[in-house]
Image (tube, rainbow, N blue to C red):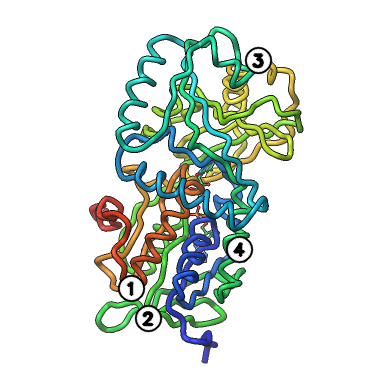
Amino acid sequence: MPKTWRPPLDVVVVGAGVVGAACAYYAARAGLAVAVVDRGPVAGGTTGAGEGNLLVSDKEPGPELDLALLSTRLWRELAGELGAAVEYEAKGGLVVAQAAAGQEALRAFAARQAAAGVVAEEVPAERLRELEPHLSPGMAGGFHYPQDAQVQPALAAAHLLRAARRMGAELITGEIVRTVRRGADGAVLGVGTDRRRLDAPAVVNAAGTWGGEFAALAGVHLPVLPRRGFVLVTEPLPRIVRHKVYAADYVANVASGSAGLETSAVVEGTPGGPVLIGASRERVGFDRTLSREVLRRLAAQAAELFPVLADVAVMRAYRGFRPYLPDHLPAVGADPRVPGLYHACGHEGAGIGLAPATGLLIAEQLTGKQPEFDLTPFRADRFPAA
Ligand SMILES: Cc1cc2nc3c(=O)[nH]c(=O)nc-3n(C[C@H](O)[C@H](O)[C@H](O)COP(=O)(O)OP(=O)(O)OC[C@H]3O[C@@H](n4cnc5c(N)ncnc54)[C@H](O)[C@@H]3O)c2cc1C
């Protein structure tokens, strides 16, 4: 007979990336008995292969921005609790326009965001270099977003899980969840790995880019696809980039559903010294091949923003696979098709930023509380079956 975890669990979270970690943290904090299972190590999925931008600046008003604004507040609270360990930096973002038309578009975008609660301050061309002394001269202007921040994603996942474990959560790594067990009425009874059975009336799908495969184990359709991204890491440098800096066309890249290659550099310094230059977007399945063309484009775009980077050595590049859903919104909340099944996946290029709000909303649903806002736009059954 396979081993059953004791004491009885309230919820099993599948996935120990930043989203699963946040779900475990808020569920444990709400007093639930939680187990987290991952087939690999903590942050071994996309969380360990992303950047840590916590952005409101790139989001249109709507459900994703609502999640981001809630997360902004929660990350600030978490930074107080988890301390410097997660390398939280409330450094703010600077979006720059290369031409007057771009600045006009940024102005209109910022005005719409302001109505939703985003703080954005216009920066005239002549003041840009007060904020970023190494920025290329000749930019048309920009917008400063003081709410944008940064964490180190793998550390964030690890420390959220550590805090959850202090509140009683169990962490099981190196075990693939192979089955979602359901009763005669269809409701979730728990999950099974090769080594054990975990009985629980609730299961959270925090399987990231593999969230669609996991949903299929529970018998439901959820079309999560990989969207590949590369990041360049420079040699350690003195603090030459102070904010998260990116060009206006990044927002259009993020919102695009195109399968083709899109690049628009986001440049940021890190406490350790290396500058991170991310990120490309393309849908090429789980192809891990290093693309010199993508790296070349990212490097050139970064040097256009910061000419000083043209002479800097790149130490390494890495890639990851964002969990992409066709309408760019994650699946968050109870699945009406399977009682006891909850989804917390499909956050594409914003999962680090959106993790705390996702975790809190899931914990609220698990404990029968009214979630902070309407989760209808995030319902997993919004995609017609293939
Ligand atoms: C290049 C790049 C740059 C990025 N930059 C940013 C950024 O600046 N800001 C931001 O917010 N986001 C960014 N992202 C996106 C972000 O990294 C992801 O949205 C986020 O990491 C998703 O976290 P997750 O916990 O949902 O998934 P993951 O971290 O992938 O975790 C899912 C886990 O589920 C496990 N799993 C799957 N199936 C099973 C199973 N059957 N049994 C057991 N375990 C299973 C996997 O092993 C994995 O560990 C970036 C992504 C990339 C690729």
**Distance (Cα) linking label 1 and label 4:** 24 Å
**Distance (Cα) linking label 4 and label 3:** 40 Å
Residue 272 shown left or right of residue 126 in the figure: right
Residue shown at the point (49%, 82%) measured from the top left? 197
Mark 3 nearby-residue class (10 Å; few <14, some 14–19, many ≥20)? some
Which residue is denoted by mark 2 in the rendering?
189
- Say whether marks 1 and 2 touch (CB < 8 Å): yes
Q: Nearer the viewer, residue 240 or 204?
A: 240
Instruction: Give the image quarter of residue 244.
Output: top right
Horizontal and vertical percent position of residue 379? 28, 56
Horizontal and vertical percent position of residue 246? 52, 25
**Distance (Cα) linking label 4 and label 2:** 23 Å
Residue shown at the point (54%, 9%) measured from the top left? 126
Label 1 SS: loop
Q: Which is more foreground, mark 1 or mark 2? A: 1
Residue 231 shown left or right of residue 336 in the figure: right
Q: Amino acid at mark 4?
A: Gly
> Which badge, 4 or 3, is on the more N-terminal residue?
4
**Distance (Cα) linking label 1 and label 2:** 8 Å
Q: What is the number of the mark on residue 340?
A: 1
Callout 4: CB less than 8 Å from ligand 1: yes
Horizontal and vertical percent position of residue 206? 45, 61
Q: Amino acid at mark 2?
A: Leu
Which residue is denoted by mark 4 in the rendering?
40
Q: Nearer the viewer, residue 4 or 110?
A: 110
**Distance (Cα) linking label 3 and label 2:** 57 Å
Horizontal and vertical percent position of residue 99? 44, 10
Looking at the picture, does residue 189 appear above or below residue 363?
A: below
- Say whether marks 4 and 2 touch (CB < 8 Å): no
Q: Amino acid at mark 1?
A: Gly
